[in-house]
């Protein structure tokens, strides 16, 4: 069940697209993969806003998934709840198998969302 949107905020969906062979796969440990993914929005003066999105993906790939990850990469969807404003969003991914870290910083402008009208009966 999805959490209710906080009043005065907008749900800002994002997808992190990791390139082919981005994540290390420990084939000795039954195709083990572990990624820590963090998304944090800050105001232009550096104050955190909207909470932090942190997720750990930790599991074992089946026999076909390693080749799919090596050829196509991985897409990770999620969302942030933010009030209207201008932000800098920082994404950080840590590969738990080999310890590599990648990051991306992007500007984001959030405008006031307008509620959908109620459908007619």
Image (tube, rainbow, N blue to C red):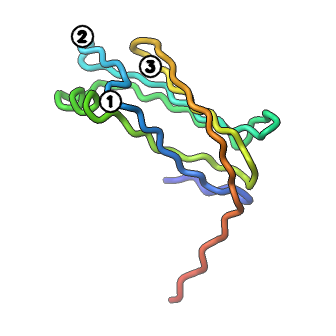
Pair 1/2: label in front: 1
The span from disc 1 to disc 3 (Cα, nearest Å) is 14 Å
Lower position in the chain sequence, tag 3 or tag 2: 2
At label 1, counting other C-alpha atoms closer than 10 Å, the crowd grade (few under 14, some 14-19, many 20 or more) is: some
Q: Nearer the viewer, residue 109 or 29?
A: 109
| Quadrant assignment, res 62 | top left
At label 3, counting other C-alpha atoms closer than 10 Å, the crowd grade (few under 14, some 14-19, many 20 or more) is: many
At label 2, counting other C-alpha atoms closer than 10 Å, the crowd grade (few under 14, some 14-19, many 20 or more) is: few
Q: Classify residue 116 as left or right of residue 16.
A: right
Q: Classify residue 72 as left or right of residue 53.
A: left
Residue 112 locus on image (x, y percent): 71, 62
The span from disc 3 to disc 2 (Cα, nearest Å) is 16 Å
**Residue placed under numbered mark 3 in the picture:** 95
Residue 53 locus on image (x, y percent): 59, 37
Specify the farthest residue to the bottom. 121
Do tag 1 and tag 2 residues touch (Cβ < 8 Å)?
A: no
| Quadrant assignment, res 25 | top left
**Residue placed under numbered mark 1 in the picture:** 20
Q: Which residue does the image show at 72% across and 59% down from the upper left? A: 7
Q: Classify residue 121 as left or right of residue 67.
A: right
Secondary structure of the residue carrying tag 2 is helix
Pair 3/2: label in front: 3
**Residue placed under numbered mark 2 in the picture:** 28
Q: Nearer the viewer, residue 95 or 57?
A: 95
């Amino acid at each position: 069940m999805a959490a209710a949107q906080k009043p005065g905020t907008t749900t800002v969906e994002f997808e992190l697209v990791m390139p082919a062979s981005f994540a290390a796969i420990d084939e000795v440990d039954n195709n083990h993969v572990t990624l820590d993914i963090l998304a944090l929005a800050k105001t232009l003066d550096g104050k955190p806003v909207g909470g932090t999105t942190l997720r750990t993906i930790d599991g074992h790939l089946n026999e076909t998934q390693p080749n799919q990850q090596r050829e196509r990469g991985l897409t990770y969807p999620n969302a942030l709840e933010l009030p209207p404003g201008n932000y800098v969003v920082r994404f950080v991914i840590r590969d738990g198998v080999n310890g590599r870290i990648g990051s991306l910083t992007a500007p984001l402008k959030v405008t006031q969302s307008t509620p959908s009208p109620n459908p007619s009966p």
